[in-house]
Image (tube, coloured by chain):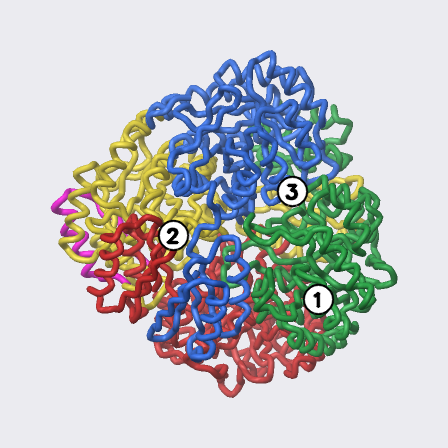
Chain colours: A green, B blue, C yellow, D red
Amino acid sequence: MIIVMVKGATKEQIKHVEDRIAEWGYGAHPIYGTERTVIGAVGVPEADKMTYVEQLESLPYVEQVISVMRPYKFVSREYHPDGTRVDVRGVEIGGNKIAMMAGPCTVESFEQTLASAKAVAKEGALILRGGAYKPSTSPYSFQGLGEEGLKILKAVSMETGQRVITEVMDPRNVELVCQYADILQIGTRNMQNYDLLREVGRAHKPVMLKRGMWAKIEEWLQAAEYIMLGGCTDLMLCERGIRTFETATRNTLDLSAVPMVKQLSHLPVIVDPSQGTGRWSLVDAMSKAAVACGADGLLIEVHPDPEKALKDGAQSLTIPNFKKLMEELRPIAKAIGREL
Amino acid sequence: MIIVMVKGATKEQIKHVEDRIAEWGYGAHPIYGTERTVIGAVGVPEADKMTYVEQLESLPYVEQVISVMRPYKFVSREYHPDGTRVDVRGVEIGGNKIAMMAGPCTVESFEQTLASAKAVAKEGALILRGGAYKPSTSPYSFQGLGEEGLKILKAVSMETGQRVITEVMDPRNVELVCQYADILQIGTRNMQNYDLLREVGRAHKPVMLKRGMWAKIEEWLQAAEYIMLGGCTDLMLCERGIRTFETATRNTLDLSAVPMVKQLSHLPVIVDPSQGTGRWSLVDAMSKAAVACGADGLLIEVHPDPEKALKDGAQSLTIPNFKKLMEELRPIAKAIGREL
Amino acid sequence: MIIVMVKGATKEQIKHVEDRIAEWGYGAHPIYGTERTVIGAVGVPEADKMTYVEQLESLPYVEQVISVMRPYKFVSREYHPDGTRVDVRGVEIGGNKIAMMAGPCTVESFEQTLASAKAVAKEGALILRGGAYKPSTSPYSFQGLGEEGLKILKAVSMETGQRVITEVMDPRNVELVCQYADILQIGTRNMQNYDLLREVGRAHKPVMLKRGMWAKIEEWLQAAEYIMLGGCTDLMLCERGIRTFETATRNTLDLSAVPMVKQLSHLPVIVDPSQGTGRWSLVDAMSKAAVACGADGLLIEVHPDPEKALKDGAQSLTIPNFKKLMEELRPIAKAIGREL
Amino acid sequence: MIIVMVKGATKEQIKHVEDRIAEWGYGAHPIYGTERTVIGAVGVPEADKMTYVEQLESLPYVEQVISVMRPYKFVSREYHPDGTRVDVRGVEIGGNKIAMMAGPCTVESFEQTLASAKAVAKEGALILRGGAYKPSTSPYSFQGLGEEGLKILKAVSMETGQRVITEVMDPRNVELVCQYADILQIGTRNMQNYDLLREVGRAHKPVMLKRGMWAKIEEWLQAAEYIMLGGCTDLMLCERGIRTFETATRNTLDLSAVPMVKQLSHLPVIVDPSQGTGRWSLVDAMSKAAVACGADGLLIEVHPDPEKALKDGAQSLTIPNFKKLMEELRPIAKAIGREL
C-alpha cells in the first residue's frame, strides 16, 4: 500500500499516517520527495486492505492511496502458474482443443432444441447451450420455460451425447439446475450477485462466469475469486462484450481481455460473439478473431429458423451458417497449433 | 414498430415482411422512399414486440427495426400523470419536502450506528440508512453483520424515531429484511437481478431501486416495471452514478437523469452523491446540485469517525460536515419552492 | 514515481531499475514488501517523467509504474491558490457574479442574431455566444457563415454592448477571430488539437477551453496547461458533457467535474447545459444544478424560433424560456451567496 | 425521416408537422398507430436532414425524429460495392496481401529510425511508420523532431525502399508533410478536426484516418466523407481502440469495427494493436485477431531498444518480437486465404 500525502503535508500529518500503519501492525516506509511525501506500508493483508485504503483516504492531507497488490489470489496465475483444464464429464476445456458450445438462445420446445442440438453436434459442438431461465430487460418479454426447459435440455443432450450449459439466475434454483446441467452459467447481469456466486461456488459443478457488461477485468477476477472460495475449481470465464458508447453493435466485444486474462489468471476463457456483437453477420469474423487471440472456447447462438426465434433472432446463426463457421475456424485453430 | 428495408430490397422481400406482420394480426403500412422502403407495423403489443424486432432483424434484407413505443407502462408518466408520493409509515417521499436519508455506509456496532443516527436525526434526517448485507467487490472485504445488523438498525431507529432503509441482496432474505426495514433498497449491482426484483415487488413494502452503473435510463425504468408488476406502488428510483472512463471520481453522477426521469415517470427520484462521487469533499456540492435540479431526496453516508469506518471512509461525511451540508441545503430547497 | 516490480523479481532486476534511476540522476528508494518490491524514484522532473514511465514499463519484470505528481503546474491550485478572475473588457468571470453567455448556436443572419442578443441582454446576459465556424459531424450540414458571421457578431454586440464569445477551429483563423471576438472558444472536438491550443495561447485574448467529450479531467487540465504555457492567463474551462453509453441525453453532463476542477485548479469553470443534454427541456434544471454546485458561468443556446434554427433547434431555448430560466436562477445564486 | 409524435398529439399538431414537411417540398405519410402517430417524410436530401431533425425535435409534441438514411455517401459500400484498393506508389492496400506498417513510435534519430526500418523491412514490412509531429497529452513530453524527423524518414526509406506513413496535425503543415510522406495519417485526436480533414482531402496523397477514441463508427465514416469530398479516393481507415471504463488496457481495441466497417464501407481497414492495447505483451495476440477478422493491414510500433524509447516504450515490440509476430501471422493470413 502506497500513501501519497498532499503537497505541504506537515510532519504531524505524516506522523499520524505512520502511527496508524504501526497501530495496524505493519511497517511504514516514508520516502521524502521533492514535492510530496510518499509512505509505503508493508505487510497489509488483502482482507484488511480496502478498509485501510478508504480510512486513509478520508484524511484531507492524504491525496491518494494506491494498492500495489492484486486483489485476488486463487484465480491468479501467480498462484497457479499452469493453465486450468476444466473437466466436464470427460470433455476438457482449456487444453489444446477449442470447446464449441452452441445451440439456441432459448429453449422453446423439444423439437426446436433437438434440431439445433443435432445440427451443431454434427459439426463438432460437444456442448449444447440453451436458456431455460432467461434474463430479459423487459418484463413483457419471454422469461423462459423454467424447469420444463431444463428437462428438454437434458432429454435432448441424452440423444446427442452432448454436455449441457445453461444459466442459473436465482440462488434458490442452483440445486435444481445442477440436476440437469453440466455447466452452470452466470450471466452478465449477475456477475456481482454475490449470494448467487457463493451458491454456485459450493455446487460441485463446473461454472462459467460471464463478464459484467460494466466490469473491469480486475472486478471480473474478483467475482471469480468469490466462486473459487466456495470450493469450485472447475471455473471458466466468458468475455461477452462490454457496454460502451458505440451503438452499431449491441456491445463492444473486448477481445484484448482474452490475452490479458490469460496473463493474469490460469482460468480458461470462452468468448461469446453472439451476445458480444448482437448481429449474426459479425459472428463469423469475431469467432475467428477470438480463436486467433487465444480463446479456449466459443459460445454461439444457433437457431434452425432465426426468423421464428422467440429471443435473439438477430444474433443467431442458421444451421448452414454455423456449418460454414466451423469450416472456417478449423484452419485458424490449426494456424495457432490448436484444434477444434 | 418501423421496419427499414435495405436499399434495393425487392418487392418479394417487402411483401415477405408485410406478410409476417399480417400473420401476427397487425397492420402493415409501407412508405416508399427515394432510397429505402420503410414499413410501419401498427398494433403490436409490448409483450410480443422484442420477439418480432429480433425476428425481423434476422432477415438480411431488413436494415433496422425501430420500436417507437416506450417499453414500460406502469412506471410511465403517461400512465400516471401526477407524481407518486411514497408513504413510509407517515413520512412522505415525493411531495414538497425533500427526504434526507443518512447514516453509516455499514452497520458496524450499536454504538457507531446510534452515534450516526442521533446526529443525523438531530439535523432533520427522518430516514436512517445503513447496510447489514454489503455487496463488496472483493470477497476479502467486510460483508456486513447480516441479521445482527438489521436488529441494530431496528433498535437504533426505535430510539431516534426514524424510518430505516437498508439493502437486500438475496431473494431468500426479503422476508427477513421486511421484519426490520421500512424501505427495501435494491443496490446498483442487482438492478437486473430479476428474481430479486419480483420478490421485493411482492413484499408490500416501499422499495428504492438504484440505477445499475451500466444502465440506460430506459433499462432502469424497465427494471422498475418488474417491481410494479409485482404489486408494489411505493417505489422510488435512486441515481447513484454510472460507469464512465473518468477516474477522478468513483462514478459519474448523472444528474441530468433526475429531470429526464421526472419527465418520463411519476416515481420519486433520490440521489446518492456519496456513491456517486466516492469523495466526501464533493458530497456537499453535488447534494446542492441534486436538490436544485429536482431530486426528491438524498442518500448520504455519515460516520462519526470516517478514519475508522469499516467501509467507504473516503466518501463518508463527518457529523459536523453533515450539519454544514444541511445548513447549506436549506436555502437551495427554499429557492426552488421546497423545504428540507 | 513509484515502480512496482513483479512478484518474484530477482535482485539483478531490482538493481537494473535502481541503476536506471541513478543514471538519470535521481534517488532510488526501494521498499521490500512481503510479496513485491516497490521502488520510489525521487526528483524526476515532469518533462522527463512520461518517457521514463514508458521505458520502465517496457521491462517484463516491472508490473506497473505510478506517477504521483500532478502532470500540470500552471493550471493547478497548488501553484495559484486563489481563484483566477478573468477580465473580458471589464466583465469579470470567476468572481462573485455568475456569467451568463447566451445566444444562438449559429449565426444565421444579422436579424436572427440581433433578436437573440437583445433578448438575452435584456435579461442580463453580458456575453453573447454564437458560432461563425461550426464543427459539424456531417459534411452536408451547415458549416457556418465564417468571417461574415464574425462581422455580424461584432455589429450586434456593438448595438447591445455585450462581449462576444465564438469558436475558432483552425490555427490559421486565430488572428482573424481575434479581430471580432472577446473570448476565443475551443470546442470539444479540438481539446487536443495542440497546434490550435498553442496558437490561442499566444493570442493575448481570453480563452474558454471546452472539455473533450472523451477527456478525463486530468487530460483536460493538461490541455489547459498547453494554453497557459503560450502566455495566456485569462483562461476558463467549460464542462459540456462527456460521451457515455446513455442515449436519452446527447451527452452526460458531468457536473461533479465542477467542484472537482475547483479543487485541482484556480481556473473559472463554465457549464454548457445545452450541449450537455441536447434537450431544451432539461436546460432549466441542469442550469440550476450547475449554479448550485459552483459553476462560474453558463453557456446557453437561445433562438427566437428554434423550429426554424439552422442548427441545434432541439437544444435551444425560446426567448420566454430563457427569461424564465433567469428568474429561476436568481434565487439559487442568492442561496449560495452569489449573484447573477 | 420518421417523426414520432407524443401520445395524445392533437390533429392540429400532426397537421403542423405535415405542413412543415410539405413546405420543404417533401412527401408526408402519416401512420396512425394505436397509441402514437408516426409520420414518414419522403425525399429529404442529406444536406438538409440534420437541420430538419433538430427543428422538429424542438416541438414539444414531437417525441423523436429518426433518420433512416445513412449520413454518408461516397464512403458507403452502397455507392461503391467493390472494396477500394489504395495504391501507395506501387504498394497496394486493400487487396489480397495484408499491409504491414511498422517502425518506431517517434523518429528520435537517423540511427534509431534506420535500425527499426531495416529490421522491419527484412521481415516484410513494406511501409515504415514513424512520428515527426507527436500529439502528446502533456505539454512537457517530447513533441517530435518536426521537419527534421520528416527528412530522416525520407532518407531512411530511400535506403530500405519502403513507403512512409507519418502523422500530420496542423493544416499548415500538410504541404510540407506531402513532400516527405507517402501516406498522410490523421491521428485519433484529430478525427473531427474538419479544417485538417478538408486540407488532406485536397492533397492528392493517400490518407489513413484513425478513429477518434470517442467516435461511433457512423461518425468515423462521416469524417471520412469529409476527406473524400475533398477529392481523395486513396483513403484508409484505422481502428486504434476506443475509450471505455477498462483501465487494464490503454484503450479498448474494438475489433468488431473491422467487419462492421467492411459491411458499411468499401474502404480498407487497418488495425493498430500497439495504441489499441498500450501493452507490448498483447500486441501479438491482437495482431493475429485483427488479421483473422479481416483487417487489411497492421500498424505496429517497433523499437530497437524500447527501454530507451523517447515515447511509447511500453507498447513497442523489440525487433526479435516483431520477427516472431510475422512468423505467427503468416499461417493465420493463409488460413483466411490471404498473404502477408
Q: Is residue C165 left or right of residue A186?
A: left
At label 3, which amino acid type do we have? Asp
Specify whether residue C63 is in view. no
Pinpoint residue B219: horizontal percent, then vertical percent. Answer: 52, 48
Report in which chain the residue with disc 2 lies. D
Which residue sits at x=29%, y=27%?
A: C331
Q: Where does the N terminus of chain B fall, quadrant-wise?
A: bottom left
Q: Mark 1 points at which residue?
A: A111
Q: In this view, does C335 lie to the left or right of D224?
A: left
Instruction: Say what secondary structure mark 3 lies in.
Output: helix
Q: Give the range drawn in magenta.
A: C143-170
What's the mark number on residue B195?
Answer: 3
At label 1, which amino acid type do we have? Glu
Pinpoint residue A298: horizontal percent, then vertical percent. Answer: 71, 65
Q: Mark 2 points at which residue?
A: D35
Could you give the CA–CA distance between mark 1 and mark 3, rounded to whole angstroms?
A: 28 Å
Q: Is residue B239 above or below residue D258?
A: above
Report in which chain the residue with disc 1 lies. A
- To the question of a shared chain for discs 1 and 3, the answer is no
Q: Where does the C terminus of chain B fall, quadrant-wise?
A: top left
Q: In this view, does B67 lie above or below A57?
A: below
At label 2, which amino acid type do we have? Glu
Which residue sits at x=67%, y=23%?
A: B150
